[in-house]
Amino acid sequence: MVLSDFQLSSQTVHIWQTNLTRSPQHLEFYQSILADDELKRARRFKFERDQQAFTIARGTLRMILSRYLNLSPKQIYFKYSSNGKPSLDQASLPLKFNLSHAYGKAMYAIALEENIGIDIEYIREIEVLSLAKRFFCDSEYQWLNSLNSEKQYSAFFQLWTCKEAYLKATGEGLVGLEDIEIATPLDSDLKILKISQDSELAKNWTLQRIETAENYLATLAIKGINYQFKYRQWTEEEEIEYNIMAKYR
């Protein structure tokens, strides 16, 4: 990675992706850079694979942020909203971020000023119509119901990632899913149609579809318009490079 990979402007958003599989040595390193509260959260997961996924996802977040902030991963402190959204506890640092992980994949969104949300989901068989009837707007439900069963799964999860990304950006948590209406049918350019029946409020939000692995869908939401999106991949090579550099700090 070069220095420009970690430089942001007010109209630039960086999106990082990584796989959540690491060697035991890397896992031990991740555990060493997490805060006590993060280690406790990891231990609350019932299954070891989920403990490791959380540890790797949060460790990678710390390493990515450390490159933007020129701090060591352990020097980064988080605070949390009432709904659990993390943000930097250092008030002088304007960096905004969000992360999401599912079924072995993780994504990170980094911006300078505006709150940002990201969500990744693995496409799987679920009760699409019953969930849509419960959590989605009527127009979204009717559109899903018009699709054949093969297309319903991907359409449902694309709508879900749009809504969850927005709610993560605002810090509201998974409440009010039905208050966010996404324009259907889904085009290449995703769009929020209304927020709590307010179409003017929706115009000041950007949704960005993110290309990722097969059978996954992801969306980013950020307040404002006319952003430039840059995509990055965090790999074990970056981690090895980071560890080498850290020895000389």
Image (cartoon, grey):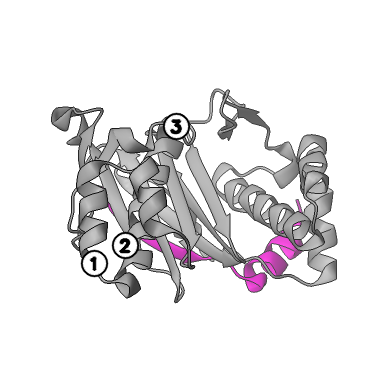
Q: Is residue 112 magenta?
A: no
Residue 175, disc: 3
Residue 112 visible within the image: no
Residue 147, disc: 1
- Asked if marks 3 and 2 touch (Cβ < 8 Å), the reply is no
The residue pinned by badge 2 equals 155
Quarter holding residue 111: top left
Quarter holding residue 165: top left
Q: Earlier in the sequence, mark 3 or mark 2?
A: 2
The residues colored magenta run: 227-249
**Cα distance in 3D space between marks 3 and 2:** 20 Å
* Element assignment for label 3: loop
Residue name at image x 24 percent, y 49 percent: 140
Closer to the eye: label 2 or 1: 1
Residue type, label 3: Val
* Image spot of residue 95 (x, y percent): 48, 37
Q: Residue furthest left?
A: 200
* Image spot of residue 38 (x, y percent): 76, 41
Residue name at image x 48 percent, y 59 percent: 121
Q: Earlier in the sequence, mark 2 or mark 1?
A: 1
The reply, left or right, for residue 99 in relation to residue 8 is right
* Element assignment for label 1: loop
* Image spot of residue 123 (x, y percent): 46, 67
5 over 33 or under it: above or below: below
- Asked if marks 2 and 1 touch (Cβ < 8 Å), the reply is yes
